[in-house]
Image: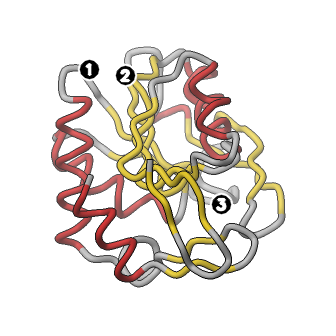
């Protein structure tokens, strides 16, 4: 998606350790016009899949998932990283290791909102090592729902996550695939 690639080149910042900071438009401060176009692009790629639900993980994926769900006219469900008093104890759970926060989370989704009748499109902002996506896939499989695929805004294709997820037979559509990043700020797209 050229619009996204252009925005990454214009406003993205590369930091040592393969960190790409896009928080000024994607996952902290949000550019709604860009996210609306991202949602439309995911719809274009998955419109014939019979999607009934969009699933993401809190917090960075929620905005993207909402614009995508609007295009599909289906609800958004997001996996929470913490059990709260207002979520029933009847949940699907999975473990996710956060590269950014250097910790492991138990993610949860209420069984009330995900079941065998759903066909799920998973949405996330980044795919690098694949831990978050694997955790979401596990939640969907545990529910008996069908996975239509995963829509990823930015994939660090030089890391193993995409390869691991695709080897499981999951369709992954990434809008910007980065072949390489250097600490001096250079990005190369596939």
Which residue shows up at 57% across the image and 79% down it?
A: 185
Q: Secondary structure at mark 2?
A: strand
Dot 1 surroundings within 10 Å: few (below 14), some, or many (20 or more)?
some
Residue 81 in the image: above or below residue 52: below
- Position in image of residue 97 (x %, y %): 78, 52
Residue 15 in the image: above or below residue 143: below
Residue with the mark numbered 1: 49
Label 3 near label 1: C-beta < 8 Å? no
- Position in image of residue 9 (x %, y %): 38, 74
- Position in image of residue 138 (x %, y %): 65, 28
Q: Secondary structure at mark 1?
A: loop
Q: Nearer the viewer, residue 181 or 45?
A: 181
Label 2 near label 3: C-beta < 8 Å? no
The mark found on residue 84 in the picture is 3
Which residue shows up at 70% across the image and 38% down it?
A: 93
Q: Secondary structure at mark 3?
A: loop
* Figure coloring: secondary structure
Quadrant of the rendered image containing residue 38: bottom left
Q: Nearer the viewer, residue 56 or 102?
A: 102
Residue with the mark numbered 2: 119
Label 1 near label 2: C-beta < 8 Å? yes
- Position in image of residue 109 (x %, y %): 58, 42
Q: CA distance from mark 3 to mark 2?
A: 26 Å
Dot 3 surroundings within 10 Å: few (below 14), some, or many (20 or more)?
few
Which residue shows up at 68% across the image and 47% down it?
A: 159
Q: CA distance from mark 1 to mark 3?
A: 33 Å
Point out the tag, 3 or 2, that comes first from the N-terminus.
3
Q: CA distance from mark 2 to mark 1?
A: 8 Å
């Amino acid at each position: 998606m050229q619009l996204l690639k252009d925005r990454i080149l214009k406003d993205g910042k590369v930091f040592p350790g393969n960190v790409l900071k896009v928080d000024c438009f994607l996952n902290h401060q949000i550019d709604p016009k860009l996210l609306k176009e991202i949602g439309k692009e995911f719809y274009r790629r998955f419109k014939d899949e019979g999607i009934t639900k969009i699933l993401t993980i809190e917090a960075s994926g929620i905005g993207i998932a909402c614009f995508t769900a609007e295009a599909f006219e289906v609800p958004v469900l997001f996996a929470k990283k913490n059990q709260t008093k207002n979520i029933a104890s009847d949940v699907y759970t999975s473990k996710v290791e956060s590269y950014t926060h250097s910790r492991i989370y138990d993610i949860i989704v209420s069984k009330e909102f995900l079941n065998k009748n759903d066909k799920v499109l998973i949405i996330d902002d980044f795919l690098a090592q694949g831990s978050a996506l694997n955790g979401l896939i596990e939640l969907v499989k545990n529910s008996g729902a069908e996975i239509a695929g995963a829509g990823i805004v930015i994939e660090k294709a030089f890391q193993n996550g995409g390869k691991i997820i695709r080897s499981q037979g999951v369709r992954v559509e990434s809008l910007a695939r980065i072949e390489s990043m250097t600490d001096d700020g250079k990005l190369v797209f596939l």
